[in-house]
Image: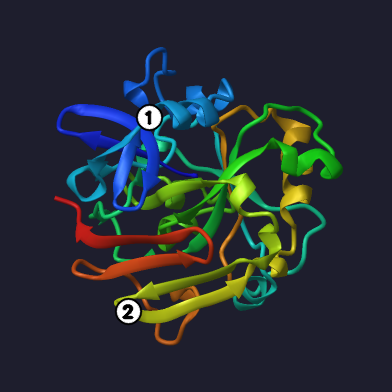
Amino acid sequence: MKIVTFRDGSRESYGAVVGDKIADFGKVAGAPRDLKAAIAQNALTSLNAGAKPEIALASVTLLPVVPNAGKVLCVGLNYKAHIEEAGRSDSAYPPMFTRFNDTHVGQGAPMVRPEASTHYDFEGELAIIIGKPGRYITKADSLKHIAGYSCYNDGSIRDWQMHTHQWIPGKNFPASGAFGPWMVTADEIPDWTKLTLITRLNGQEVQRTTTDLMVYPIPDLIEYISGFTTLNAGDVIATGTPGGVGFKRKPPLFMKAGDVVEVDISSIGVLKNPIVDEK
């Protein structure tokens, strides 16, 4: 299934994309209040059986896949090419930081370059959404805890990111990142290592990788992260960006108003957003 969270008029809901329509799970009797709750209750299959594809996909506003994630945990320096372009050395453990929910927009919504900086960079990534909660999850059991996968753009304000050794300021400007267009359920992606990730800026390819090139594979990430925090249903892990980021290019390539950025992941879809300046 492809599951979206959306706004239809003043109403927010979630459901399955079927062709060019949405089967609205929120209209099913007894439906959990939102996607996070539906994941927690393992209700997606039954909801899909009870909903009909009646809403035109083009008529709604797509929201971040999980707008109310309890945790958004992001991995840095998870591809060798990005480690090398950043001039960093390998680490035994994955560098981690967090993002806030209000830093996300959904498919088609503007990503906002803040007044504070012109150093606004793209970072295409694969995101995973946790389905089954757990603490101290082993690598062997890790994939059982994934509800699905999505595209992610870890839009980064590079000068603020580099103010100190902690990256959080540059990663948390409002509406600076994107998450969508939907979650593809894990049963439709039997091998996460066989995905191709491409980022485009104004139609030009700027990043490309295959997910088997992660330095810290997804099972390792889940084992490590669940070692310091409980992973709950609806939590999000952004698994890191490949080489080709703008601030390491010569000359640097930063996003500006009028640009369009896309994160395209095979078997998932394309997350496409225009760039605007903060008003």
Quadrant of the rendered image containing residue 88: bottom right
Q: Are marks 1 and 2 in contact (CB under 8 Å)?
A: no
Vertical placement of residue 261 versus 75, above or below = below
Identified by mark 1, the residue type is Ala
Residue 92 seen in the current view? yes
Mark 1 → mark 2, Cα distance in angstroms: 36 Å
Residue position marked by numbered label 1 in the rendering: 51
Badge count: 2
| Camera-nearest residue between 63 and 155 | 63
Position of 91 compared to 255: left or right?
right
| Camera-nearest residue between 227 and 18 | 18
Quadrant of the rendered image containing residue 59: top left
Secondary element under disc 1, as helix, strand or loop, is: loop
Residue at 71% x, 67% y: name it. 212
Place of residue 97 in the rendered image (x, y in percent of width and height, measured from the top left): 58, 45
Vertical placement of residue 267 versus 3, above or below = below
Label 2 environment density (alpha carbons within 10 Å; few <14, some 14–19, many ≥20): few
Quadrant of the rendered image containing residue 135: top right
Residue position marked by numbered label 2 in the rendering: 203
Label 1 environment density (alpha carbons within 10 Å; few <14, some 14–19, many ≥20): some
